[in-house]
Amino acid sequence: MNILFINPVTPPGIFPVQMSMGVAYISAVLKKAGHSTKLVMPYAFSEKQVSGKIDEFRPELVLVSSVTDQIGLAEKIINFVYDKYQLPIILGGTHAIVAPEESINIKGLLGICIGEGEEAALELADAMEQKKDYSKIRNLWLKTGNKTIKNPLRQLIQDLDKLPFPDREIFEEIDTKDELEFMGSRGCPFQCSYCVNRALRNAYKGCGTYVRIRSVDNLIAEIKQALKTYKTAKILFHDDTFTLDKKWLREFCEKYPKEIGMPYAANGRVETMDEEMVRMLKESGCVEIKIGVETGNEELRTKILNRHMSNEQIINVFNLCKKHKLAATSFNMIGLPYETEKNVKETIALNKKIKPLRMGVSIFRPYPGTELYNVCKKNSWISPRKVSSYFEDVSILDMPQLPAKKIHYYHKIFKLAVYHPISALFVNVLIKTGLYPSVGWLFKSAKNIAVKVLSRKQKDFLQRVMKI
């Protein structure tokens, strides 16, 4: 059976297009069973792009994977595909899982996947190909007439080593020369109030262990296989917390330099890191560890974000990274519920202290299914404004103590205020005189061109020198 994946992505220039590990794994499972798959990754609605792929590939089933930020685009595409081709369409991805009642009502859908998709997609494809009944497949909600069949969740896949390696072949649009993406685990044990992981874990209650980690040998075998086909400068691990299991990490850090020996980057978490771990990461080839700081105000971080780490712990971990010459990136959010201007300045001040090599600054986005989404909805803070990524410089919240214009302002000057305070004063003048849009556009255009034409070493140099 021919199966087309449609995976709407963030518009170019906002954030680099990356692999959807969910799509990659489902495609691998389907191919192993003898089915054929193709993928289209639209960032805007284009009849020509979608029709071109459908007319060329002639799929018999369409699987759409979407996060909340792209659900509006996904809905337009689903409507179009159904109206023009009358193909069976299933919507999966995090939005369908955390907002199933909203998702199932999208016009043109046969149904939605409310859990992990590998086994459900394979059962559906096999049943359709063999013209068998598929109405009772677990993890699927299916429309039949005016009714919806709400099948229960199946058990989570406990042994990730049994899955085939993710299918990279279908991601034709992704350039791997700078980095090649992998994931060694699924799930996160932490209870952050802004993250969909908490909602996913609650949805999977009674379905087995939520946090699952592949064996080190299995992960290294996948990397070896991928490197036979794809040339890259760096390995990137997408695990929510690569530093979660110290015993696993110790084995990884022992085997990785011997078996692979390439530079890599990963996500860490302050509560899980100590000096031994930082040293192991550095010695094994880690060139960047990305750490969530989120806010410089401890009360906001603890009581609102449910992240229990002190400023002292954060400073200590970043100091350990400096001591062992391990580059550390900080992730920060502004525009949080109940946040004030003073709190934003505290986040800037904390970053000045920890001096990260790189810094991510995003505007808080309340996602359906999260605790903070409910807080924002209860307080009527959510505006009609739309965004296609939490990396956009727009807040969808209207809060009395921190208006959207103020959030937008601090997002513009945040990095400059940390790395180049004098430049921040200059930008502040430009903003107040109304001249910033043109100057800011010029800077952003130059940055986008640099990202496209410079080599990884040249981009790293600019990052170190200018902190852009």
Image (tube, rainbow, N blue to C red):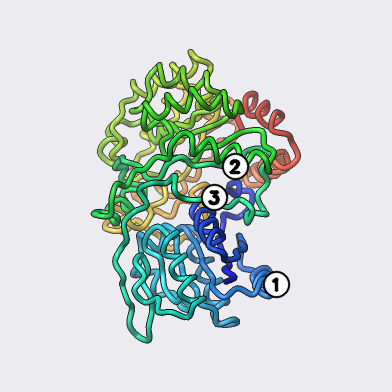
Task: Decide which of 316, 174 is in the foreground and name it.
Answer: 174
Q: Position of residue 39 (x, y in %)?
A: 61, 62
Query: Marks 1 and 3: CB-CB under 8 Å?
Result: no
Query: Marks 1 and 2: CB-CB under 8 Å?
Result: no
- The type of residue carrying mark 3 is Pro
Task: Decide which of 134, 304 is in the foreground and name it.
Answer: 134
**Quadrant of the frame with the N terminus:** bottom right
Residue underneath mark 2? 433
Earlier-in-chain disc, 3 versus 2:
3
- The type of residue carrying mark 2 is Thr
Measured in 3D between alpha carbons, the distance from the residue under mark 1 to the one under mark 3, in whole angstroms, is: 24 Å
Q: Position of residue 193 (x, y in %)?
A: 30, 45
Res. 119 visible in picture: yes
Q: Position of residue 125 (x, y in %)?
A: 49, 70
SS class, disc 3: loop
Is residue 145 shown above or below 252?
Answer: below
Measured in 3D between alpha carbons, the distance from the residue under mark 1 to the one under mark 2, in whole angstroms, is: 53 Å
Q: Image point 42% across, 50% down: which residue?
A: 365
The mark closer to the camera, 3 or 2, is: 3
